Image (cartoon, rainbow, N blue to C red):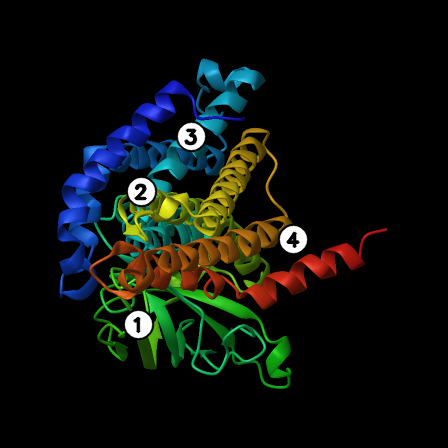
Amino acid sequence: MIEWSEPQRMLRSAVRQFVEREIAPNLDELEHGNTPPYDTLRKFLKTFGIDVMAKQRFEKQIAQERAKLAGEPEPERDDEEKDPAMAEMMRGEETAMRMIPTIELCRYCPGMVTAMGVSMGLTAGTIMSRGTLAQKERWALELLTMDKIGAWAITEPNSGSDAFGSMKATCRRTDDGGYVLNGNKTFITNGPYADTIVFICKLDEPGVEPKQRKVLSFILDSGMEGLTQSKPFRKMGIHSSPTGELFLQDVKVGPERLLGETEDISYRSGVKDTFSAERSGVAAMALGITERCLELSVKYAKERVQFGKPIGEFQLIQAKLAKMEIARINLENLVFRYIETVAKGRGMTLAEASAMKLYAAQTAVEVAMEAVQIHGGNGYMAEYQVEQLARDAKILQIYGGTDEIQITHIARDLLTRD
């Protein structure tokens, strides 16, 4: 894949029009006011039928799982799915159609992508991949359509990158087959407003070293006794993505809330798979930020006059613009490679996803800071959008695993190869 197809370009244009009509005029309120992004995101999903498509995919998967549990033949596959070439094309098209809205939203409001991705991707995706049929039917669909908001809670005040080794949150078995949960989580996207929470903790296993204890996950609902959700934090960037803390004090849950309803499989491997999926999406976010920064910088370089001529005629400004365009091309190629990888039915390894995120995050920050530099004093003012994009870009180097963690994963993979 070397360029967007005509249908993909049409979708990009439609999404861009929606963003410029519904989000750009309200950006100040979304970024600095008291308006959570969820109603706007729901309108976005309905406008493009994303909620309907999510429901259709959900119902199809549930029907297949029901048939399998009942020992019945799987539902007849569509003709397209029977043809390997057609199935490959469909996978690629679906992935592209998912990446394009991410790119376009990030041109103005990267925080909205974070809020949406954690709810529909991380939280719903975790339940769909690890949950029982009953859990999927009870919780997943409303998350996939954003009728309810989801949060994925792993990070703790003292854990950071050492999510498992420093994890203090615990679950303790009770005599009636349930559990009691305790612990604090922080930096939780959608935490203040989440209806459904995937809470990750360690099983209290006497005689087992804390670092070796099983990592289990539970599905919680807001309003449960002992569960407290904080107000949104004040942050450097992505203000349209509400972030907060969760406090659990003796929260009692039944076994039906244990993800997968089994302790036999620790959730450590599942979290790594989740991180890989999350990191792959950062390239699309970085591309959106980069595209917009370059667009604004070119416009400014044409209009801003210094020493009697537009600054775009100065070679140092031209060098900055040229490097930004190279970065844009590289990021676009990373996105195209990811789409092709999914189309071929091959998932990305953790090292590949880490390399993708590392480059994309660093590139977005570098381009955004150069955009501020081109704008000079104006670029430091909130009146100019590059100021916001520079603040928003920085989070890409932190969440989903810091740059330093990505380097470790890549290097370990290289050093363990034969």
**Cα distance in 3D space between marks 4 and 3:** 24 Å
Q: First in sequence: mark 3 or mark 1?
A: 3
| Residue 331 placement (x, y as % from top left) | 51, 43
Amino acid carrying mark 2 in the image: Lys
**Cα distance in 3D space between marks 2 and 3:** 38 Å
Q: Which of pointers 3 and 1 indicates the residue nearer the eye? A: 1
- Neighbor class of circle 3 (other Cα within 10 Å; few <14, some 14-19, many 20+) is some
Q: Which of pointers 4 and 3 indicates the residue nearer the eye? A: 4
Q: Which of pointers 1 and 2 indicates the residue nearer the eye? A: 2
Q: Name the residue under label 4.
A: 351
Query: Toward the viewer: 373 or 234?
Result: 373
* 397 to the left or right of 150: right
Q: Mark 1 points at which residue?
A: 235
| Residue 309 placement (x, y as % from top left) | 32, 46
Q: Write the residue at 79% across / 59% down.
A: 415
Query: Toward the viewer: 239 or 388?
Result: 388
Q: First in sequence: mark 2 or mark 4?
A: 2
Discs 2, 3 touching: Cβ within 8 Å: no
* 57 to the left or right of 82: left
| Disc 3 element | helix
Name the mark on residue 94: 3
Is residue 80 at least partly visible in the picture? Answer: yes
Q: First in sequence: mark 4 or mark 1?
A: 1
| Disc 2 element | helix
**Cα distance in 3D space between marks 1 and 2:** 33 Å
Q: Write the residue at 48% across / 26% down.
A: 3
**Cα distance in 3D space between marks 2 and 4:** 41 Å
Q: Which of pointers 2 and 4 indicates the residue nearer the eye? A: 2
Amino acid carrying mark 3 in the image: Glu
Q: Write the residue at 42% across / 30% down.
A: 94
